[in-house]
Each structure stands twice: as C-alpha cells, then as structure tokens.
Image (cartoon, grey):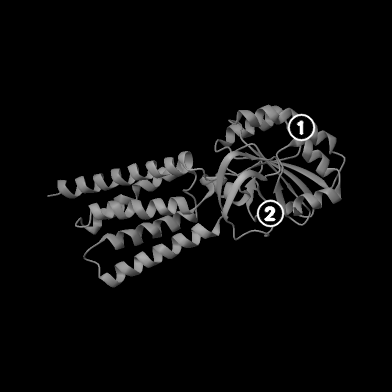
Amino acid sequence: MIRKPIFKILLGILSFAILLFALFFLFLKVLPIYNPALLKWIPILICILGFYVSGTINKNTSVWYLPFLFLPLLIFKPFRFLYFPFIIVLIIIGVLSLIASRKEVKKVYRVTSVFILFLVFIYFLLSQPLILLQKGFKETQDGNLVNAQTVWDFNTGSDNYLPDIEYIDPEGNLVPLNTYRGKTLYITFWATWCSPCIAEKPALEQMKTEFEKDENIIFIDISIDRDTKRWEKYITNKSPKGIQLNTNGYDPETMQQFYFSEIPFHCIVNPEGVFKQSNDLEYSKVILKDKNRLQSFIQK
C-alpha cells in the first residue's frame, strides 16, 4: 500500500523537475527576453504550473506525503532564485497550487487559491520591465539598450538608489553599503572565478591610481564569490586598492537590486546614492573627472 503513494510522489517530483528545466530553458535560452534571470515572475509561473501538475498527480495521495513535492525547489538554487525572503513566496505559491489541485478541498477554497495565485503572478509580472530583444540588439557600456522593444516598464523615471544591504570585509566585519553615501562611488562586481573580471583588473587598478588623490571618489570592489577563502587569498596576494567587500552569500539579492546578471559589472553612484551602470572604464574616467557630466550621466 505504501509503494503506490511513494511512486506517485516520485512521479510528481520528476514531472515538476522536467517542467522546471524545460521552462527555464525556454525563458533563458530560447525566447528573446532581456535579462530573464532577473525576472521573478518566471520562477513564480514555473512553481504554479509545477506544483499544480505534481499536485494533480497526487490528488489522492495523503497530505502527509505532499511536503516531498517541495524538493524540486532546490533546483532553483543554481538559478539564483532560492534566497530569503523570495523562497517564502515560492513556498506560499506551492501551498496554494497544491490546494487548488486537491479535489477534497471545498470549491470555494480552491477558487480562492487560484485567484490569489493569479494576483500574485500579475503583480510580479508587471512589477519588473519586460523587454524583448530585436535583430541587432546590443547593450551600451552605460546600460542603454539598442534594438530592444519595451513591452512595459512601470518603473520608468524612478531612480535606482543604493540598496540598504550589508556585505563583509576581508576581516569578516559587516559593512553597510550606505556607509559610503555622500561620496561618489565606483562599484565593481566581480569574482575570482570570472576570467573577464581578472583580465580587466590591471586596468581597474590603474584607474584607481589616477583617482587616489581625490577624497570624494571611492572605489569599491564587491566579490560574489561563495568561496570566501579563495577571495581572501586573492586579496592577500594581489593587494588591490580601494575597499574590498564580499556579498557573503547574498549574491542573488545583490544581482536583483543592482539589475545585473553577468560580471564584471560596474556602476557609478553619485553622492545622493543614485547609481547607474558604467562598464566602460575609460568612459567612466571621463565621467568621474567632471561633476556636471556625472550628474548629467546619472539623470539621463
């Protein structure tokens, strides 16, 4: 008697996993969507469909076995969607989807669950820009998109303020990023395993040397290395200039808050705490040397 529910649970997990990989491949590799790895509605849609399918397969399985259907959520980790508090949203989505799939649950509760799922999905769908890539698409060094069609962006005109987040320094001390507000910042996100990041390090260090006498400009290198020992070893051996920080495992949140999915990623932050992407080191030098140009760059 136990074999049948176990088989259905395994079938539900497998179905969820297959659906998850198929949809991630579709959204991340096939469809011409800009920065799909940052769009939260994608994992939410996957969870709604995945949990509903696995729940339907197990509609007659005892509820005591249903927690095992949440195991596929672990697959979200390499896709950088398994982080707090977003994981709470995914769990709630899972619970509501399973309720919607259970025939013994009163219809009013199933309908209510579906309605809530719809509202949550629509909220996340519209809360982030949806941009489609067209032929000849490219992204300029300051983050502007060429040959891209914006389907919707309800955040147009809003400033990107430095997030209230804490990182660690090489000594393990927590450092709030907002500590440096009031200064002009040049922030670099990188990792020791990132070949392009390492390749541009000499040019970045030369850039820091050019501005080392300007007390109003601070260079901050933020590593997204999960292996902090490797990061600390690099810092010890290379002694890079500027402030050295590590995301301390909060790289998914960081990438969401700074709107990037690839490294190296650079941004300039004005004294008011508004940041904008600026990946070209030479162009960034020109901006940092002229306060008026800096403000114009941030505001455009």
Taking the image as shown, residue 76 lies to the left or right of residue 255, namely: left
Q: Earlier in the sequence, mark 2 or mark 1?
A: 2
Residue at (40%, 43%) from the top-left corner? Answer: 75
Badge 1: how crowded within 10 Å, few (<14), some, or many (20+)? some
Q: At which x and y percent is residue 87?
A: 45, 54
Q: At which x and y percent is residue 102?
A: 25, 61
Taking the image as shown, residue 186 lies to the left or right of residue 118, namely: right
Q: How many marks?
A: 2
Furthest-bottom residue in this view: 108
Amino acid type of disc 1? Glu
Amino acid type of disc 2? Leu
Q: Label 1 near label 2: C-beta < 8 Å?
A: no
Taking the image as shown, residue 48 lies to the left or right of residue 60, namely: right
User: Quarter of the image holding residue 237?
Assistant: top right
Which element is circle 1 on? helix
Residue at (23%, 52%) from the top-left corner? Answer: 57
C-alpha gap between disc 2 and disc 1: 23 Å
Q: At which x and y percent is residue 157?
A: 68, 59
Mark seen at residue 162 = 2
Mark seen at residue 205 = 1
Q: Nearer the viewer, residue 201 or 109?
A: 109
Mark seen at residue 133 = none
Q: In the rendered image, is residue 257 in sight? A: yes
Q: Nearer the viewer, residue 234 or 54?
A: 54
Q: At which x and y percent is residue 9?
A: 24, 48
Which element is circle 2 on? loop
Q: Nearer the viewer, residue 85 or 44?
A: 44
Badge 2: how crowded within 10 Å, few (<14), some, or many (20+)? some
Furthest-front residue in this view: 135
Q: In the rendered image, is residue 254 in sight? A: no
Residue at (79%, 49%) from the top-left corner? Answer: 184
- Residue 81 higher or lower than 127, as above or below: above
